[in-house]
Amino acid sequence: MCTLDRHTDQAYPKGYPRLAEFMASDNNFMLLRSFRGLHMRALLDLQAELVRLEKDLDSIDLTDWKNEEYQLLQSRYWDRQKARVGTKRHGRPHRPVLLKMIRDTLKEYDELVSRTSEVIIKTRPSERDYRQLWKWFDNNQPLTSLEQDYINHRFDLIALRPERERGNFDAWFADKIMKHRGTVTKFLFDAPAVENPSDPSDPGDPEISYFIAARIEAMSTFVITTIIGLLLAGPVTVMYYLTSRRIIYPAIAALVLFTLLFSTVLSRLAHTSRNELFAASAAYCAIMVAFVSNASSER
């Protein structure tokens, strides 16, 4: 089911202790609700409060201007002295009191805006990670139905792990190992089990495969490096064969084909951004073009 560094979740009591340990055992399972709706509700409430305070401040300024109390608008000192006379003016708090309320509300509003922006840019979990965590919830039922319901809010969940911590190939590679588990793969990748002290006979969840994540990542890195190396060495051989026989147009077609193949493989194997993919493809194409040009000039 997953790649974990240790099999320890069964060593904890059922409930939040076991759930927390299971989610902490693999960064891909650190999925929580973002509460986007509640964030926006709180922001809208603070925004409405600031709008009201803004209108009250504008009204006080306009009233003082109409009453020719220019000194109150031009001097903070006299404005504060005026505020000591009474608690309200024209049914509203004095300007210094109102400004203090505005500062406090703005501080709360700005902090919430900043925190909300940090939440909404978090990566949403992949379908694979969500499906596996949901399956674990369904098999183990660690919490009450009310508190466990958060896992059903698929599109409100966020992943705490960095967006590019693990590529698609790592997940695919782990799934393949899980489906084709043999003596060799168990020896290389299986994590040692930890006995449940409360129930030593408890075998744990039989549907979960516990792997050593570092070994999975090392092996997938080796495979990716090998494939990228072949994508560099293979085209050079083909291009050399074509250019050595002055078959230029097929060589150009092969260049385009290999560049597209390189971009496709890179996007599937490594979690790269569009800018990185474009830069890598451009560099790859430049190398192929330079090779064709040099080979053609030598002939």
Image (cartoon, rainbow, N blue to C red):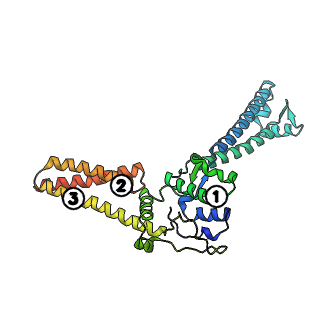
65 sits left or right of 20 in the view: right
The percent position of residue 254, horizontal first and vertical second, equals: 21, 50
Residue 53 vertical placement versus 193 (above, below): above
- Secondary structure type for disc 3: helix
Calculate the distance from the C-alpha at mark 1 to the C-alpha at mark 3.
56 Å
Q: Amino acid at mark 2?
A: Leu
> Label 1 belongs to which residue?
141
Question: In terms of sequence position, does the residue under pointer 1 or pointer 3 come before the other?
Answer: 1
The percent position of residue 24, horizontal first and vertical second, equals: 59, 64
Mark in the foreground, 1 or 2: 1
Dot label at residue 266: 2
Q: Amino acid at mark 3?
A: Val
> Label 3 belongs to which residue?
236
Residue at 64% across, 51% down: 150
- Secondary structure type for disc 2: helix
123 sits left or right of 291 in the view: right
- Secondary structure type for disc 1: loop
Dot label at residue 117: none
Q: Residue furthest front?
A: 201
281 sits left or right of 26 in the view: left
